[in-house]
Image (tube, rainbow, N blue to C red):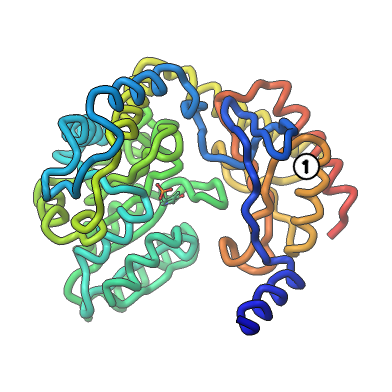
C-alpha cells in the first residue's frame, strides 16, 4: 500500500496524477460540473447527438420493446434483430460487405488485431496510433514496427527491409488522429499495402460522421474505401452512442466472429445503445448540415487563434494547442475553467512528454460566438502562463 501511495505522490509532483471530474450533466456543447455550467470543448460528441431527441426516443422505444440487457454474448443468442440491422447499416455506410459490432472501440481494436495476427507476423503502426491498437499488438505477440507520424516514405522503407521476414503484415493507422487533429495519407498507405502484400486497418473513430460525401469518413473522402481491409470505428463519438465496429469483407468478418476474443467472451450491447446508433446513422444521412457547420467552426477557431499568434496543429474538428510542460498545460486549463471553459489538459502518457496540450474538440452544438470567445480566452490564458 505504501508503494502505491508513493507512486501516486510522485505522479502528483510531476503534474501527472489524474482524478475523475464529478460531472453532473452534459450535452449540447455544455457541461455542468460542481453546480456550474461550462462551454464543453473536452468531449467527442462531435455532432451533438448524445442528447438529440431522435436518438433518445429510439433508445427508449428499444428498451420498452426488448428490455434493458442483451441477455448473453452474440454467439450464445444474445442481442436482438437491432444488432443485425445495425451491422447491415454499418456495412452499407462504410461501403463494405459486412460489419461486426464490438462493445467498444477499444475492444474492437484489441479483438481484431489479436485475432488476425500471432508471433511470426508483423504490425507496422503509425507512431501516434491509439493505445487500443497497440494493446491489440501486445496481446497477439506479433512484432511491432512504428513509423514516424504520417510518414509513408519511412513506412515504405520499413516494409522493404522487414516485410519478407514475416508471414502476415498489417499496416495500422488512425484516419483522423485523436490527439493531433491531423489526417493520415490514406492513398499512400493504400498503395503501400498493395505493393507489399500487407493488410491495412484504418481506425476512423474521429472521422466517422464528419468527413466524406455521406459522412462515412476519411476513407470515403479519399476514395480508398475499397482498398482498406479493415475499416474500424466507434459509435461512441460522432454517433453519440456506444459500441465499436469493424466493416470488412465477409472472410474477415466471419474469421473475427470465430476468433476475436473480445467479441466472443462479452455480452452483447444493450438494445437501447444499438437503437441509438441506428438513429444516429439516419441523422448523419438526413442532416449533412451538422458536419458542414462543425467543419466551419473548426476553420473559424484556427483562424481566431492564428490572429492572436497561436498555431493549432491539424485541420479537423480536433484543435490541439501544444503547450509543452505538464505544469503549463494544467495551469492554462485551470485558467480557462475559471473563464467557464471546460477543457482538460492532455498529458503523458496519452501524448509524449513535453508535448502536453489543450485538445479543443468542437461540436456541431457550438455556435460561432462560442468559438470566438474560446479563441480569445485561450490566447489570454496562454499569454498569462508563459512557457
Ligand atoms: C476513442 C477511440 C477508440 C476507442 O473507442 P471507444 O468506443 O471509446 O472504446 C479507438 N480508437 C481511437 C482512435 C479512439 O479515439
- The residue at the far right in this view is 384
Residue nearest the observer in this picture, 92 or 158: 92
Residue 330 location, quadrant: bottom right
Q: Which residue is found at the position 21% from the left and 69% from the top?
A: 117
Task: Look at the image and tell me in which quarter the C terminus lies.
Answer: bottom right
- The residue at the far bottom in this view is 3
Q: Which residue is found at the position 42% from the left and 70% from the top?
A: 146
**Is the residue marked by circle 1 packed among few (<14), some (14-19), or many (20+) residues within 10 Å?**
some
Q: Secondary structure at mark 1?
A: helix
Number of numbered labels in the structure image:
1
Residue nearest the observer in this picture, 230 or 156: 230
Please provide percent x and percent y for residue 96: 19, 39
Task: Look at the image and tell me in which quarter the N terminus lies.
Answer: bottom right
Please provide percent x and percent y for residue 236: 42, 40
The answer to whether 363 appears left or right of 308 in the picture is left
Q: Which residue is found at the position 45% from the left and 42% from the top?
A: 206
Please provide percent x and percent y for residue 368: 68, 21
Residue nearest the observer in this picture, 240 or 89: 240
- Residue 263 in the image: above or below residue 300: below
Classify mark 1 as within 8 Å of ligand 1 or not, answering yes or no: no
Q: Name the residue carrying label 1.
A: 337
The answer to whether 215 appears left or right of 313 in the picture is left
Residue nearest the observer in this picture, 145 or 66: 66
Please provide percent x and percent y for residue 84: 16, 34
Amino acid at each position: 500500500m505504501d508503494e502505491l501511495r508513493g507512486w501516486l505522490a510522485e505522479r502528483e509532483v510531476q503534474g501527472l496524477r489524474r482524478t475523475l471530474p464529478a460531472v453532473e450533466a452534459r450535452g449540447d456543447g455544455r457541461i455542468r460540473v460542481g453546480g456550474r455550467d461550462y462551454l464543453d470543448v473536452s468531449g467527442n460528441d462531435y455532432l451533438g447527438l448524445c442528447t438529440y431527441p431522435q436518438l433518445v426516443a429510439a433508445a427508449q422505444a428499444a428498451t420498452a420493446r426488448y428490455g434493458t440487457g442483451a441477455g448473453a454474448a452474440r454467439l450464445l443468442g444474445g442481442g436482438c434483430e437491432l444488432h443485425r440491422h445495425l451491422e447491415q447499416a454499418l456495412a452499407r455506410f462504410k461501403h463494405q460487405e459486412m460489419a461486426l459490432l464490438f462493445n467498444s472501440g477499444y475492444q474492437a481494436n484489441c479483438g481484431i488485431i489479436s485475432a488476425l495476427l500471432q508471433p511470426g507476423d508483423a504490425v507496422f503502426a503509425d507512431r501516434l496510433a491509439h493505445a487500443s491498437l497497440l494493446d491489440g499488438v501486445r496481446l497477439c505477440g506479433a512484432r511491432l514496427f512504428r513509423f514516424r507520424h504520417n510518414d509513408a516514405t519511412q513506412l515504405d522503407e520499413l516494409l522493404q527491409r522487414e516485410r519478407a521476414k514475416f508471414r502476415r503484415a498489417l499496416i495500422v493507422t488512425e484516419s483522423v488522429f485523436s490527439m493531433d487533429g491531423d489526417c493520415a495519407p490514406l492513398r499512400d498507405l493504400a498503395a503501400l499495402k498493395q505493393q507489399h502484400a500487407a493488410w491495412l486497418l484504418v481506425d476512423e473513430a474521429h472521422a466517422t460522421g464528419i468527413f466524406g460525401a455521406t459522412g462515412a469518413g476519411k476513407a470515403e473522402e479519399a476514395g480508398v474505401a475499397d482498398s482498406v481491409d479493415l475499416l474500424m470505428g466507434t459509435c461512441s463519438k460522432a454517433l453519440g452512442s456506444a459500441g465499436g465496429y469493424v466493416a470488412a469483407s465477409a472472410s474477415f468478418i466471419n474469421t473475427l466472429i470465430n476468433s476475436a476474443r473480445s467479441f466472443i467472451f462479452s455480452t452483447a450491447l444493450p438494445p437501447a445503445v444499438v437503437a441509438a446508433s441506428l438513429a444516429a446513422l439516419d441523422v448523419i444521412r438526413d442532416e449533412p448540415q451538422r458536419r458542414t457547420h462543425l467543419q466551419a467552426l473548426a476553420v473559424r477557431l484556427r483562424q481566431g487563434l492564428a490572429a492572436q499568434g497561436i498555431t493549432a496543429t491539424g485541420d479537423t474538428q480536433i484543435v490541439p494547442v501544444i503547450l509543452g510542460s505538464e505544469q503549463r498545460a494544467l495551469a492554462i486549463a485551470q485558467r480557462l475553467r475559471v473563464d467557464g471553459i471546460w477543457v482538460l489538459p492532455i498529458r503523458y502518457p496519452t501524448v509524449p512528454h513535453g508535448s502536453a496540450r489543450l485538445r479543443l474538440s468542437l461540436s456541431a452544438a457550438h455556435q460561432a460566438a462560442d468559438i470566438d470567445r474560446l479563441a480569445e480566452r485561450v490566447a489570454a490564458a496562454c499569454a498569462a502562463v508563459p512557457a
